[in-house]
Amino acid sequence: MQRVSEVRPRQVRRCTADPPPAERGGLQIVRNHEEILEGTTVRHRFGEVTVSLVQGGPRELVRPGRLIADGRRARLRVCRPLRGEVWVFQDGRHGVVRPPQLISFDTGRPFKVIMPEEFRMVDVMVTHSLVGLTATDTQRLTARAWNGDQGVAALLSGMLEGLDRHGEEVETAVDLLGGSVAGLTAVLFAERMREVAPDSEIARQALMLRIQAHVREHLAEPSLSPNEVARRHNISLRYLQKIFQEFGVSPARWIRDERLARCRTELADPALDHLPVALIGERAGLYGASHFSRLFRGRYGVTPSEFRKERRAMHHLDSDTVSNAGARS
């Protein structure tokens, strides 16, 4: 298997007289799993999903193995080019995609991503647990293109294109559509797994996705707990913990983070501003205003009230900017 550092652009397609992007100064060494890509114009997080709009000139993104000390915090990234091409090299394969195609890579292993020309793309970053996959699973999935014009790939590709076309609304859009992006991404990987993986691994991933769907459906119930989840799925608590341990998180922690992500989504929705903050917490199973506030601040750095206040202030600022611009015209 070639090392990422040994792969050259000419191995992807026709040879050209142009030097590779790195020789034109467009090289970015990716040093951590969630590093912001150069050229990012919008970046927004929804629970375990981060969506970025990235644009720029020719460049290479490289992550050598010497910089990967902890693979437990690795992320899966799905690229949807909006303009130009994206080349991905990982796990002994390379893939080339252009609109409306999709392609993925795993930050927990060495990779190289090349944009050989002016480009614009949507970068979706998800945790492994969100799509029910381990790092071992993803070795079969990276650097393989989805055609983007049929099935689930078409749905996800179209949604990501829509986020770009309505970029000025992306802050609200990602909060409101983040669950759909997460669900479609999970199904996309599940379909690919059925094509390339043994039945035992497919069954484990399917179980993980069923568990996640069950948790999200019952977040408001105070009785929701690891014990209850294990009982509902006819598995032992120990086996449930083992499944989540593969992703570096406990079932209890994952349930708590899902509840907080649901609260963040509802606090970001102006249509729910009439609901008291404490009720937002209760709707996601977090009872007790002080308890909810403490957990939310620990996860997002601000209290629920502060988060809602900042969102309203930003909305008013944007409205004033539009009004002033109209007045000047």
Image (cartoon, rainbow, N blue to C red):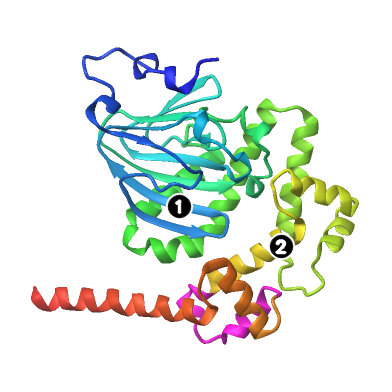
Query: In front here: 240 or 161?
Result: 240
The residue singled out by tag 2 in the image is 255
Query: In front here: 17 or 170?
Result: 17
Q: Position of residue 118 (x, y in %)?
A: 25, 35
Q: Height in image: 247 above or below 105?
A: below
Q: Height in image: 21 above or below 236?
A: above
Q: Height in image: 291 above or below 66?
A: below
Q: What is the three-letter code of the residue carrying label 1?
A: Val
Q: What is the three-letter code of the residue carrying label 2?
A: Ile
Q: Is 141 colored magenta in this rendering?
A: no
State how far apart marks 2 and 1 are (Cα).
22 Å
Q: Is residue 329 left or right of residue 285?
A: left
Name the quadrant containing residue 92.
top right
Q: Is residue 105 left or right of residue 222?
A: left
Mark 2, Cα crowd under 10 Å, few <14 / some 14-19 / many 20+, is some
Mark 1, Cα crowd under 10 Å, few <14 / some 14-19 / many 20+, is many
Query: In front here: 249 or 127?
Result: 249
Quadrant where the N terminus sits is top right
Q: Height in image: 158 above or below 5?
A: below
Q: Residue at x 45, y 78 (%)?
A: 270
Q: Is residue 127 left or right of residue 147?
A: right
Q: How many discs appear?
A: 2
The residue singled out by tag 1 in the image is 51
Name the quadrant containing residue 309.
bottom left
Q: Residue at x 71, y 68 (%)?
A: 219
Q: Check disc 1 and report its element: helix, strand or loop.
A: strand
Magenta stretch in the rendered image: 267-285
Quadrant where the C terminus sits is bottom left
Q: Is 279 colored magenta in this rendering?
A: yes
Q: Residue at x 66, y 68 (%)?
A: 259
